Amino acid sequence: MIKKKNNTYRLIKANIGKLVIIQQITEISPSRLISIFLKNIASDNLFIQKKTKDGYWYWKLADNTAYKYFKKELSAYLKSNVDDLSFHIMKEYVKSNYLTKPYFGHNYAYLANIYFAQEQPLKDFVREGFIATNPITPDMTPKEVAIRNQLLGKISVKHWIGDITNYDYFSQAPGFMMKNVEQALQYIDLYIINILNEKQLDHELMKLSTNQRLKTKLMQKTAHADSKPLKI
């Protein structure tokens, strides 16, 4: 059960449209995005202060609860907006108008390409090492082969940007490879912070949210009117 003892959940809920759009168009790891989002918020706005006889104290967050809550809200938002034209239009609008900004000399696509250029050699190195140390042998049972292939699949599968650092095999690569990936991620983090701080984007997403609510109300009103029996 997720305990809502501070403003983290309220802030995620209030900004869910913005966070979902940014996550989808940047393909950044949800856990990394929510960490960037919360670190970008002043502590006074993040924590609920509770008065005690010794003064105020903060409700702290348990590990990973913010990510779990965001993942739940992200899934629900995508499910409810899968057929919403305004949501898809806004995604393309943000992608073409905000991911193209050269905040510090480069657009997002350039930074993402640098990241993938560092991630792939690391994955290849770990994958080759895994295959060399875990070959399929004639004496292996089907279950053992399946487990081995499942572990190999976790290395080979495409990740959200930055998600690779959450896997145990990340630390099996040479130090310079890990460093290169982490440095590329620092630029991506900084770029996303700039997007999160765009006041104009907040205004545009607010209009989207208003339009979505109006559309929902109109649909409900139409459905209610259609359900009324005709009087003859």
Image (spheres, helix red, strand yellow):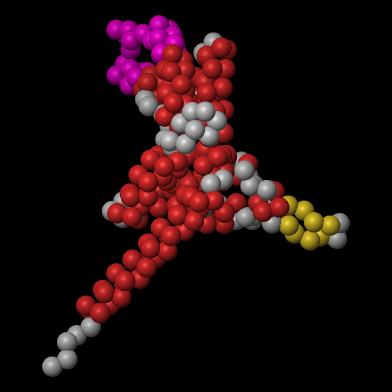
Does 143 lie within the magenta span?
yes
Residue in the foreground of this view, choosing between 184 and 53: 184
Q: Main secondary structure of the magenta part?
A: helix
In the rendering, at what x and y percent does residue 101 appear? 47, 36
Which residue reaches farthest bottom?
232
Relative to 184, residue 131 above or below: above
In which image quadrant can residue 215 be found? bottom left
Which of the two residues, 162 or 186, is positioned nearer the viewer here?
186
Q: Nearer the viewer, residue 40 or 78?
A: 40
Q: Which residues are magenta?
A: 123-149
Note whether residue 73 is visible. Answer: no
Q: Is residue 152 visible?
A: yes
Q: Residue at x 43, y 60 (%)?
A: 207
The residue lying at 75 percent from left, 59 percent from top is 50
**Residue occupying the point 44% across, 46% down:** 20
155 lies above or below 47 = above
Relative to residue 146, is residue 26 depicted above or below? below
- x and y percentages locating residue 198 in the rendered image: 53, 46
Quadrant of residue 232 within the rendered picture = bottom left
The reply to whether the magenta stretch includes residue 187 is no
Q: At which x and y percent is residue 175? A: 57, 12
Residue at the image point whose x is 68% and y is 48% from the top? 42
Percent position (x, y) of residue 97?
41, 42
